[in-house]
Image: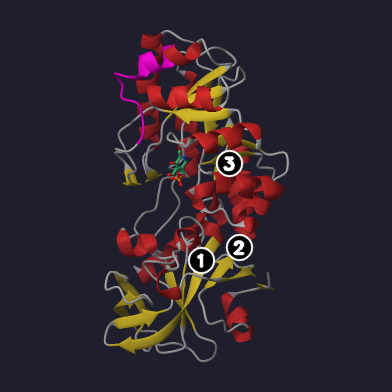
Amino acid sequence: MHSYDTPWDLIRQEQPDRPIAVCRPHLVRQAAEWFLTHFSGDTLYAVKANPAPWVLKTLYSAAMRHFDVASTREMEAVAAYCPDAVMSFMHPVKSRPAIERAYKEFGIRTFAYDCEAELEKIFTATGNAKDLTLILRVAVSNQGAEMPIDGKFGATAFETPTLLRDARSRVERLGVSFHPGSQCMDPFAWSAHCELLSRLITEADVDIDIVDVGGGFPVSYPGKEPPALHRFTAAIREAFDRMPLPQHAELWCEPGRALVAEGGSILTEVHLVRGNSVYINDGAFGSLYDAAHCDWPYPTRLIRSSGTPSARLKAFKLFGPTCDSEDVIKGPIFLPEDIGEGDMIEIGMLGAYGVTMQTRFNGYGETLDVVSRDAPWGSVFDTRNELASLDWFSRFQ
Ligand SMILES: Cc1ncc(COP(=O)(O)O)c(C=O)c1O
């Protein structure tokens, strides 16, 4: 990968006919080091947020050694770039061949389940292995999350005690987990979920070896600035300490977004401007899936190779490159009013759920990866940048 000091340096030297995925490994490293230092338990990286080789290599070099995988492809990627890393298969619904390969080929011993049928499937597919760690995913309210993901997985409060008792006598280690929803802005959501788990563990009357408090840790987007991250880790530790657990019980978390969002952005080229519509070469079927389908707000800035853009901003909507009329980011996205063909728009905070969402629809969906050494949008992991980021957000919102 070529590397540059800033995106301006890179567009003077690279003019690819595709969007550029700007990678900032130093910011991924900073996030990883923060979690490994401040979360008082084990941090697993949720690979789904961004499985790119540069991300896995960066996390590994930052001493991340535990990965939450959800598919065979993710196992292959971790095995290729993170030798000796431990993987946990945290998808609550898996195919038998995927479980078998995980156990036999990748040495995975930790599996999530959320119902009796999945529990039996895991035992059968591993040949009734005696060395399993099973983690029961419990359904919790996703109130407080900007991107709720509830309603799909998780045992109900009614089912949980039986599912815990059924597994306890058959496994080496037993855990419980939940996911509070992505970009969860309320530290006390974790406290409430831990209290619920405490009640269910007491009702089941079993020893629990692991409590996995999921992902969901927030970072800063325009209009979505979370409380300081240490408030989350403190609330979680306090809640964990109040749980009815044996002395040896472990605390885990599995962030995706928080570890990688700041570390990536997309540089997309303007092909045409018509009124307040800007036509670009990335969109709803590429890296801008969440921007288009969930109206997710990302920071944006204009990158022009020479000349200064107008200081006056105008509200635009962005159309992606495919023929589908759903391929639009309604915004409003505020950009210099003289934006024109050949300008580049940098869309930030796309290290998580960005390139990983790409499809090949209409022949698009490929990016050129380059490294940039700057840090344009401030970081929740670096308090020195707080003022810069506030100033930036107030100009562009
Ligand atoms: C089981 C599990 N763990 C972790 C994550 C990562 O969540 P986030 O990116 O919000 O941190 C997800 C996201 O869907 C998930 O399903």
Q: Are marks 2 and 1 in contact (CB under 8 Å)?
A: yes
* Amino acid type at image mark 1: Ser
Q: Residues within 10 Å of mark 2 (few under 14, many from 20)?
A: many
Asked whether, in this view, residue 312 is left or right of residue 207, the answer is left
- Judge whether 146 appears above or below 14 on screen: above
Cα–Cα span, label 3 and label 2: 18 Å
Cα–Cα span, label 2 and label 1: 8 Å
Residue at the (43%, 73%) spot, across then down: 282
For the record, the magenta segment spans 153-165
Quarter where residue 196 is shown: top left
* Amino acid type at image mark 2: Arg
In this rendering, does residue 297 appear at all?
no
Which secondary structure, mark 3?
Answer: helix
The disc at residue 35 is 3
- Where residue 87 sits: x, y (%)? 61, 37
Residue at the (40%, 48%) spot, across then down: 226
Within 8 Å of ligand 1, the CB of disc 2? no
- Where residue 388 sits: x, y (%)? 49, 64
Q: Which residue is mark 2?
A: 24
In magenta stretch: residue 164: yes
Figure label count: 3
The disc at residue 147 is none
Quarter of the figure that contains the N terminus = bottom right
